[in-house]
Image (cartoon, rainbow, N blue to C red):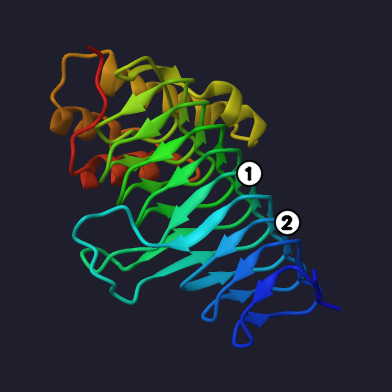
């Protein structure tokens, strides 16, 4: 059965599935939908057209679905969509989208969002990511699956963060970060590939070798980006690891992080 604490304020028109738990003093507004088994701790505020999947745990003092921090926003009917099995820790803020973009801020499945994280309007976050404490995403940021943000790291608005990448503590990126890379520093610089992360995700030694070769072509040669892509395309792809890398490089709009 759904359990709503007597001090919580839940709109009669909010859609709460079975076994949802709403803790003390939390506020759930009218257009909110929450899936089976999701736990909402105390003092959480969920507003606007917000859809939350099943088996999430949203900890105290989280704010989801409030207005975007964008001066152009003028009350448009925009949204937040959150998937399943996410852990969203204390004081995280996830703002709804804007009409200047897709209109929806999205968080996928199985993400581990630590305390004081900010996910701004129109961000599109994939699955199995980790955002350590105080990570900040500007608006319109796209984050690939299995990306990891160290504490106090962040991404400038409109940046793309590739799958399986790793941002070290206090790192900030203002350009696109290709898949598989480790970056550190302020501004962030590439320091190699995310070798430990790839091993943990069962990438084979041959796949890792391919990714290392791609990295060398991109960062350890004097090739222009187009020339590096041409060389990387010659690598014998095994299970799509090189295809993912090439597609990201071809779609970059802000340029990629480089060594300073």
Question: Is residue 54 or residue 88 the one in the foreground?
Answer: 88
Q: Quadrant of residue 254?
A: top left
Q: Residue, x 47% and y 54% (percent of image)? A: 94
Question: Is residue 203 or residue 137 the one in the foreground?
Answer: 137
Q: Residue, x 16% and y 14% (percent of image)? A: 222
Image quarter of the C terminus: top left
Q: Residue, x 59% and y 43% (percent of image)? A: 113
**In the displayed image of the protein, which residue is found farthest to the front?**
7
Q: Which mark is residue 41?
A: 2
Question: Is residue 134 or residue 53 the one in the foreground?
Answer: 134
Q: Quadrant of residue 225?
A: top left
Q: Provide residue 189's location: percent of width, then percent of height.
A: 32, 17
Placement of 116 over or under 81, stated as above or below: above
Instruction: Check disc 1 and report its element: helix, strand or loop.
Output: loop
Placement of 184 over or under 60, stated as above or below: above
Q: Which mark is residue 205?
A: none
Judge from the rendering whether residue 169 lies leftward or rightward of residue 213; answer left or right: right
Which mark sits nearer the N-terminus, 1 or 2?
2
Judge from the rendering whether residue 202 lies leftward or rightward of residue 63; answer left or right: right
Q: Residue, x 29% and y 32% (percent of image)? A: 232
Q: Quadrant of residue 84?
A: bottom right
**In the displayed image of the protein, which residue is found farthest to the right?**
1
Which residue has dot 1 on it? 90
Instruction: Check disc 2 and report its element: helix, strand or loop.
Output: loop
Q: Provide residue 39's location: percent of width, then percent of height.
A: 74, 61
Mark 1 packing: few (<14 Cα in 10 Å), some, or many (20+)? many
Placement of 156 over or under 128, stated as above or below: above
What is the CA distance from the residue labelled 1 to the residue labelled 2? 10 Å
Image quarter of the N terminus: bottom right
Judge from the rendering whether residue 112 lies leftward or rightward of residue 120; answer left or right: right
Q: Provide residue 32's location: percent of width, then percent of height.
A: 55, 76
Q: Provide residue 214's location: percent of width, then percent of height.
A: 35, 27
């Amino acid at each position: 059965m759904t359990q709503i604490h007597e001090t919580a304020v839940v709109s009669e028109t909010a859609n709460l599935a079975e076994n949802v738990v709403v803790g003390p003093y939390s506020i759930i507004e009218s257009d909110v939908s929450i899936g089976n088994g999701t736990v909402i701790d105390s003092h959480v505020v969920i507003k606007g057209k917000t859809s939350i999947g099943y088996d999430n745990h949203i900890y105290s003092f989280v704010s989801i679905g409030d207005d975007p921090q964008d001066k152009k926003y003028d009350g448009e009917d925009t949204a937040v969509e959150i998937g399943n099995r996410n852990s969203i820790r204390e004081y995280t803020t996830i703002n709804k989208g804007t009409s200047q973009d897709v209109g929806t801020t999205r968080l996928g499945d199985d993400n581990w969002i630590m305390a004081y994280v900010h996910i701004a309007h129109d961000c599109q976050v994939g699955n199995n990511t980790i955002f350590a404490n105080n990570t900040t995403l500007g608006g319109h940021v796209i984050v690939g699956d299995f990306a990891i943000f160290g504490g106090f790291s962040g991404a400038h608005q409109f940046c793309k963060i590739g799958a399986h990448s790793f941002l070290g503590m206090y790192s900030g990126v203002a350009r696109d970060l290709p898949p598989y890379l480790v970056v550190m520093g302020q501004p962030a610089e590439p320091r190699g590939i995310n070798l430990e992360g790839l091993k943990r995700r069962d990438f084979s030694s041959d796949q890792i070798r391919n990714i290392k070769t791609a990295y060398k072509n991109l960062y350890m040669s004097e090739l222009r980006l187009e020339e590096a892509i041409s060389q990387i395309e010659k690598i014998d792809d095994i299970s799509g690891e090189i295809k993912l890398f090439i597609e990201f490089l071809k779609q970059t709009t802000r340029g990629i992080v480089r060594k300073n």
